[in-house]
Image (cartoon, rainbow, N blue to C red):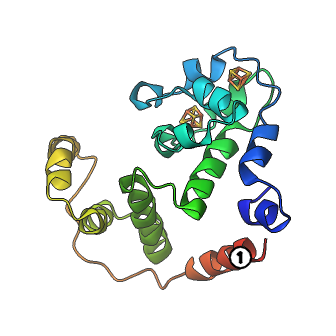
């Protein structure tokens, strides 16, 4: 259930998310399978528990759902077949919709990523990171990424890219359509 739809129908979107997790038996398979869990302040298993316990404020202080890379491993492995990746995405959407942006950098990162995909049909790393650094307006952020950037360049995983012509905005229509659909929900 989309956030807008639940809210428009007078239902609590957080409660709607919680309903989908009712069958969680806290086995921890999701956490054990999550490649990003080592960076999360609450493990995925703890996040489901917090949702079920109605700990909305505490949850939106957490960075966990922002760090979910949507790899779907937890969803594939959950013995209860719960829509865990979709739930992480629903938490991100709800955080943006309700302004729970304790961690402002993550939404800015997502925006820079999606703008690059919309423009070129793929991510142009150098340009995307430049947009992100400009958006966060904090000179220490680019510095914190410098060691990783250098490592990637040495290994040939990332190249300095010259400005390129946008890919004709081929995905712009698709983005517009999704925007219209989301607004109508
Ligand atoms: S794997 Fe599924 S049932 Fe187990 S803790 Fe995670 S969400 Fe709950
Ligand atoms: S979808 Fe997100 S929470 Fe699930 S295993 Fe992947 S990174 Fe972890």
Residue pictured at 39% horizontal, 30% vertical: 39
Of 160 and 137, which appears nearest the observer?
A: 137
Residue pictured at 45% horizontal, 80% vertical: 167
Of 8 and 78, which appears nearest the observer?
A: 8
Tell me where residue 18 appears, x and y as whole percent.
Answer: 76, 39
Instruction: Name the quarter showing ligand 2.
Output: top right
Determine whether, in the image, residue 114 is placed left or right of residue 30.
Answer: left
Tell me where residue 47 appears, x and y as whole percent.
Answer: 60, 31
- Tag 1 residue: 183
Determine whether, in the image, residue 114 is placed left or right of residue 98.
Answer: left
**Visible in this render: residue 153?**
no
Tell me where residue 43 appears, x and y as whole percent.
Answer: 53, 26
**Above or below — where is 121 with respect to 110?**
below
Determine whether, in the image, residue 12 is placed left or right of residue 37.
Answer: right
In the picture, the quarter occupied by the C terminus is bottom right
Q: Residue furthest right?
A: 9
Q: Quadrant of residue 10?
A: bottom right
* Helix, strand or loop for disc 1: helix
Picture mark count = 1
Of 177 and 54, which appears nearest the observer?
A: 54
Residue pictured at 69% horizontal, 14% vertical: 27
């Amino acid at each position: 259930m989309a956030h807008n739809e639940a809210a428009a129908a007078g239902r609590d979107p957080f409660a709607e998310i919680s309903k989908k997790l009712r069958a969680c038996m806290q086995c921890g398979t999701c956490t054990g399978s999550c490649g990003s869990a080592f960076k999360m302040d609450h493990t995925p298993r703890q996040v489901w528990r917090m949702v079920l316990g109605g700990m909305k404020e505490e949850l939106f202080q957490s960075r966990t759902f922002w760090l979910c890379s949507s790899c779907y491993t937890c969803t594939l492995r959950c013995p209860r077949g719960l829509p865990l990746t979709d739930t992480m995405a629903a938490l991100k959407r709800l955080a943006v919709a309700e302004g729970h942006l304790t961690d402002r950098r993550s939404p800015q990162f997502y925006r820079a990523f999606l703008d690059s995909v919309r423009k070129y049909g793929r991510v142009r790393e150098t340009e995307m990171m430049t947009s992100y650094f400009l958006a966060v307006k904090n000179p220490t952020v680019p510095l914190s990424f410098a060691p990783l950037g250098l490592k990637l360049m040495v290994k040939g995983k990332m190249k300095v890219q010259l400005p390129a012509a946008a890919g004709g905005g081929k995905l712009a229509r698709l983005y517009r359509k999704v925007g219209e659909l989301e607004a109508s929900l």
